[in-house]
Image (tube, helix red, strand yellow):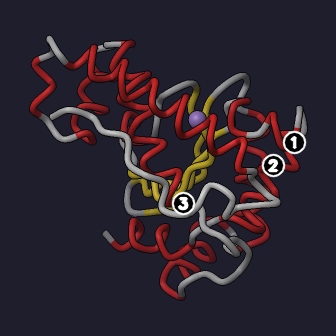
């Protein structure tokens, strides 16, 4: 299975002013493209190549295949990241079943928002913060570099990229402001709900 770069699900200027056209051009066309190219190079001679991308993530991590973990991991993470955002997203317009789980497992919307932002803020260096399903419950997680919750026995339902390439053009070093804008103005809760219910 060759990895392919999908088109963005919205126009490059659709997420302004919270994420600029320039950021999306670099992030999607250059950074994500590089993970696709490098991932395909690592997969070319790998016995994992015939597996689904979810399985490649899990097996590559178990086998400590750093090239696949970082590049196929990042491909998986970005495939979903583009869909985890939409114009006029974010805030509390959350489908009921998902909101009930946030209330039950994450202490409600405000605590979820605080803890998600904090996870992203305290991820040292490059990585991601997440809401994931683990052992039947929602949990806030963070992972370094190209790792994701699949590699740690959990199913990601929302993730935010805290690599500097995701926010430095728009927010400079203000990672917290970027994370708050992501939760308040960008999250596509319908896509989160789809992954929650799957
Ligand atoms: Mn990225």
x and y percent of residue 77 in the render?
Answer: 46, 41
CB of mark 2 near ligand 1 (< 8 Å): no
- Taking depth in this image into account, of 43 and 34 the one nearest to the observer is 34
x and y percent of residue 148 in the render?
Answer: 46, 37
- Taking depth in this image into account, of 136 and 164 the one nearest to the observer is 164
Residue bearing the label numbered 2? 178
Query: Residue 175 lies in what quarter of the image?
Result: top right
CA gap, disc 3 and disc 2? 15 Å
The earlier-in-sequence mark between 3 and 1 is: 3
State if disc 2 and disc 3 touch (CB < 8 Å): no
Q: Under tag 3, what secondary structure?
A: loop
Locate the C terminus and report the quarter of the image it occupies.
bottom left
The earlier-in-sequence mark between 3 and 2 is: 3
CB of mark 3 near ligand 1 (< 8 Å): no
> Is 52 above or below relative to 185?
above
CA gap, disc 3 and disc 1? 19 Å
x and y percent of residue 121 in the render?
Answer: 79, 39
Looking at the image, in which quadrant does ligand 1 appear? top right
Task: Give left or right: position of 150 versus 118.
Answer: left
> Is 51 above or below relative to 21?
above
Query: Residue 122 lies in what quarter of the image?
Result: top right
State if disc 2 and disc 1 touch (CB < 8 Å): yes
Callout 3 crowding tier (Cα within 10 Å): few <14, some 14–19, many ≥20: many
Callout 1 crowding tier (Cα within 10 Å): few <14, some 14–19, many ≥20: some
Q: Under tag 2, what secondary structure?
A: helix
Locate the N terminus and report the quarter of the image it occupies.
top left
Q: Under tag 1, what secondary structure?
A: helix
Residue bearing the label numbered 3? 84
Residue bearing the label numbered 1? 171
Callout 2 crowding tier (Cα within 10 Å): few <14, some 14–19, many ≥20: many
């Amino acid at each position: 299975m060759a990895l392919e770069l999908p088109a963005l699900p919205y126009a490059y200027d659709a997420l302004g002013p919270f994420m600029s056209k320039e950021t999306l051009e670099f992030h999607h066309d250059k950074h994500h493209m590089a993970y696709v190219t490098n991932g395909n190079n690592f997969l070319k001679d790998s016995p994992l190549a015939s597996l689904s991308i979810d399985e490649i993530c899990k097996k590559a991590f178990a086998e400590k295949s750093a090239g696949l973990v970082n590049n196929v991991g990042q491909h998986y993470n970005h495939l979903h990241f583009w869909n985890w955002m939409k114009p006029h997203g974010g805030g509390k317009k959350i489908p009921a079943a998902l909101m009930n789980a946030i209330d039950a497992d994450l202490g409600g919307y405000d605590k979820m928002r605080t803890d998600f932002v904090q996870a992203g803020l305290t991820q040292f260096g490059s990585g991601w913060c997440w809401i994931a399903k683990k052992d039947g419950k929602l949990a806030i997680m963070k992972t370094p570099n190209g790792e994701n919750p699949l590699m740690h026995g959990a199913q990601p339902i929302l993730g935010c990229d805290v690599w500097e390439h995701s926010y430095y053009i728009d927010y400079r070093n203000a990672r917290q402001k970027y994370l708050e804008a992501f939760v308040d103005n960008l999250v596509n809760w319908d896509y989160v709900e789809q992954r929650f219910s799957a």
